[in-house]
Image (spheres, rainbow, N blue to C red):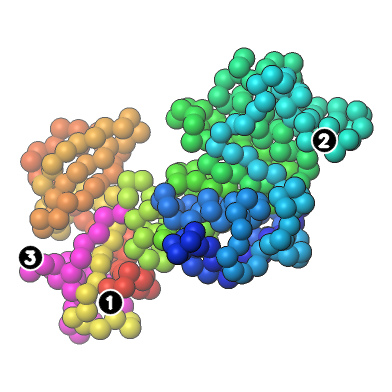
Amino acid sequence: MASIDIQSIRKSFGAFPVLHGVDLTIRDGEFIVLVGPSGCGKSTLLRMIAGLEDVTSGDIRIDGKRVNDLAPKDRDIAMVFQSYALYPHMSVADNMSYSLRLRRSTKEKIASAVGGAAAKLGLEPLLERRPKALSGGQRQRVAMGRAIVRQPKAFLFDEPLSNLDARLREQMRAEIKKLHGDLRATSIYVTHDQIEAMTLADRIVAMHGGIVQQVGSPLELYDRPANLFVAGFIGSPGMNFFEGRYLVSGDHADLRLPNGTTMPVRKRDGVESGSAATLGIRPEHVILADNGALEAKVDLIEPTGFGIIMHVTIHGIPMKIFSQDRRMLKPGPTIRVDLPQDKLHLFESDGKRVD
């Protein structure tokens, strides 16, 4: 396996810039997930690492070697695409062994590599079938097996589960994570699904507008989002936000909302009283309490089975609450809630987090 260093990478399509100076170091054996909305540049960055897109400026190094000018076949990486890209006229075994046969590997080496990958992926009973006789999940496992037999320096995954239904996605997430645990292979995985990012990654790279917004473990991004974008993107349902003015009076601080009401917040150093700020809290951190400090008007109830998503209005501002209390399935027109101080996030006018 190998480390991958991305240094000041920029990419433009004509006059349109897509990536704006990305710096990232991926450690040997690490599972990195690039996550962000459509158009943020994550797939473009992955394709540049693979050699499928040219670098406008900056350097990409694999295992210390600059690869900007190397053809994809010379970078010793394997890519698993969103589409399975299997040869329909070949059996599973032939699809998996195709790259080794192109390299004129010995029959013994091919048989050993295909057998080992098939055992890891549960494909042994399917080796003689053709792709049309496989389910979507089985085809994706074959695509991963084709990558594994090459024993590359790094694996690149470009939204490999997006064509699968919800149950298969869940199953394949677990299989990919188990496979990484067995191989400890350097892996870069692209997705717009933050659940995939949270469950698979050693570290998440959150991207927006061609810029890396934050790099850290899944729980670091969840617990301490660096800015408003990360706070709103990571988590489901997304974080609630209240915009207002940060006001300090002695040892106390409040957020004054546009309608004049105030919400108490923990006093932060380095934030000027009267400056614009945004207060955030995750739906699952809102506490339902009969004697809660805030009154919330209930607008909509969404039962999910595991819990309940409540759409409410507080001080004229819509927000969501996630609860596992089934009594809330038949609430009155209003409820009382508390916003715990240790679960509140404060962001300055430029969107950056205030510690």
Q: Which residue is mark 1?
A: 267
- The percent position of residue 295, horizontal first and vertical second, equals 11, 53
Q: Which residue is mark 2?
A: 102
- The percent position of residue 23, horizontal first and vertical second, equals 57, 68
Image: 47 above or below 246: above
- Residue for point 9% across, 38% down: 332
Q: Nearer the viewer, residue 166 or 291?
A: 166
> Marks 3 and 2, Cα distance to the nearest angstrom?
69 Å
Q: Which label lies toward us, 1 or 2?
A: 2
* Secondary structure of residue under mark 2: helix
Left or right position of 136 against 181: left
Of mark 3 and mark 2, the one earlier in the sequence is 2
Residues under numbered marks 3 and 2 in contact, where contact means CB atoms less than 8 Å apart: no
* Secondary structure of residue under mark 3: loop
- In the rendered structure, which amino acid carries the disc numbered 1? Lys
- Residue for point 67% across, 46% down: 155
Mark 2 neighbour class, 10 Å CA radius: few under 14, some 14 to 19, many 20 or more: few
- In the rendered structure, which amino acid carries the disc numbered 2? Leu
Q: Which residue is mark 3?
A: 259
Magenta run includes residue 252? yes
The stretch in magenta equals: 239-268
Magenta run includes residue 326? no
Left or right position of 132 against 346: right
> Marks 1 and 2, Cα distance to the nearest angstrom?
65 Å
> Marks 1 and 3, Cα distance to the nearest angstrom?
22 Å
Q: Can I make out residue 214 in this image?
A: no
Q: Nearer the viewer, residue 123 or 54?
A: 54
Q: How many marks?
A: 3
Of mark 1 and mark 3, the one earlier in the sequence is 3
